Amino acid sequence: MAASVPALNRGATGAAASHTDHIIIEGIHKSFGSEQVLRGIDLTIAQGQFVALVGKSGCGKSTLLRLIAGLDSPTEGRVLIDGELLKNQNTGARVMFQDARLLPWKRVLDNVGLGRPGNWRQEASKALLDVGLTGRERDWPAVLSGGQRQRVALARALVSRPRLLLLDEPLGALDALTRIEMQRLIERLWRERGFTVLLITHDVEEAVTLADRVILIDQGKISLDEIVNIPRPRQRNSAHFGDLSEKILESVLGKESKPLDD
Amino acid sequence: MNQSSIRGKQSKVNGFFRHLLLSWAVPAVATIVWQLSTHPPEIFARVLPHAEWLSLVNRSASLAQTFPGPSQIYAAGGHLWKTGELLSAIEISSQRASLGFLVGGSVGFALGLFNGLFSFAETMLDSSIQMLRNIPHLALIPIIILWFGIDEPAKVLLVAIGVFFPIYLNTFHGIRSIDPALREMASVYGLKSWSLFWNVILPGAMPSILVGIRFALGLMWLTLIVAETIDADSGIGYITNNAREFMQTDVVLMGILLYALLGKLADASVRLLERILLSWQPAYQR
């Protein structure tokens, strides 16, 4: 199933449901030189939905995220945000990258408040409280662990109360334990605030744990669009979870079940 | 305060003194050996046979003529200090140095920023600057004397030219080497023009800019020494050059040591600046 999927019902215990379409992607193609990265993507994401994008390296998922962030523009097709054509940067969106990208010359609190107008210190402190880093306001990023840096990056992303959070494999470089902690943190904040999330991940289990909907991109096209109907909080050891993960993983690997080449 | 933190503080203080002691050990030993070999103390007369002592005194006296000992240099400096010549020479030399540094440094910094920030400016100017950079700036002395004579502007200009290149190059390089990922992040967070410059570009380029300043300060003194030695009617170079004509080796050596001291002082001040401006770098967090 490669066609667009209309706004779907949210998972049973998701945040307040809303039926407005937040992001509409119509016939997107993107080429870099002669290389075609995206070849006709149609996608509709509802306000407040948690969507995971999975796929092999180089399948075009990061490119799609950059188009939605407005960091790149499509070669063909268009991106609509709340029904309006996205021309420049998507100001309602915040991006978290695989590396935290903190400014090393700013203390933690100043990093969180980056680009915030007016009296931002209070909201930045509040954001640090939300990610469990109170007391580290005056630290330099260099002294933090990888997981703590990503928490600061998350606080920085959320301090402006964005409506869309774009996560470009932000947990890929973390150790297994820190990763689960961060997953829970992101899920909790999403449920409290109800922003829309687009998460890119290599980890199918992570996608199934967090997302309302898992989309597989293969060679620049959507090759699977799966609703995850498992009640939250999700147990990884449930049969349903296992079946679904297995199904998605099989699709990622392809029919011939070649080993991943990344 | 508990026991261990007191001990920690104490070991920090001890470490500081040990570092200080160790870093000054070599110059201190060199000075003592130098002093002893040019001015053997009387106590040697009691332990050495008389003939040996006399020949030692002779040899050290002739050595002291070509290579005066620390006490002679100190005395020469003390004499010049009393007459006020020394202080006014230091003042005038420092003035020339800092004025040249300020002029050359600000032009270099401004051009470095300009070419680093705008690629059209780089295309237009950088290759010309690279061409000029390959001229040793001291080779310009004859033409500068022809144009400006031997007055103050000539010396200041020469220092300014010497200082310009390291600051230009390092400012430019510092801006160009900022991680593009950080710039992209900044643009996602809505930083534009002035706030982008102030929050990302300038602090990102700062380590490189400070390296440039350190290089420039070395070149600043070097250029000034050459300029003052060639022609001057005041300043440290004038004193040493004058002393050369009267064979006052001790004064010449005093002038050389003075340059070393001033150079060290300039370097120490940049180190302090680095400690303040780059306190975010792990190397400065202790």
Image (tube, grey):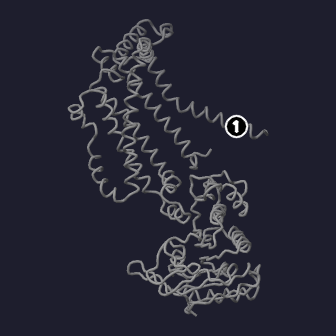
Residue B94, image quadrant: top left
Q: Is residue A246 left or right of residue A257?
A: right
Q: Pick whichever, A133 or B48, lies toward us.
A: A133
In the image, residue B239 sits, relative to residue A216, either above or below, namely above
Indicate left or right for B103 with B179 as reference: left
Q: Amino acid at mark 1?
A: Lys
Establish if A95 lies above or below B90: below
Quarter location, residue B51: top left
> Residue A27, image x and y in percent?
49, 87
Residue A228 x/y as whole percent: 69, 86
Residue B272's spot in the image, x, y percent?
Answer: 53, 38
Task: Read off the residue under disc 1.
Answer: B9
Dot 1: what SS? helix
For residue B249, above or below residue A17: above
Give the residue drawn at x 45%, y 49%: B208
Q: Is residue A187 above or below residue B192?
A: below
Q: In this view of the protein, which residue sits in the foreground, B41 or B21?
A: B21
Task: Point out the image quarter for the N terminus of chain A.
Answer: bottom right
**Percent coordinates x, y for residue B246 in the rendering:** 29, 14
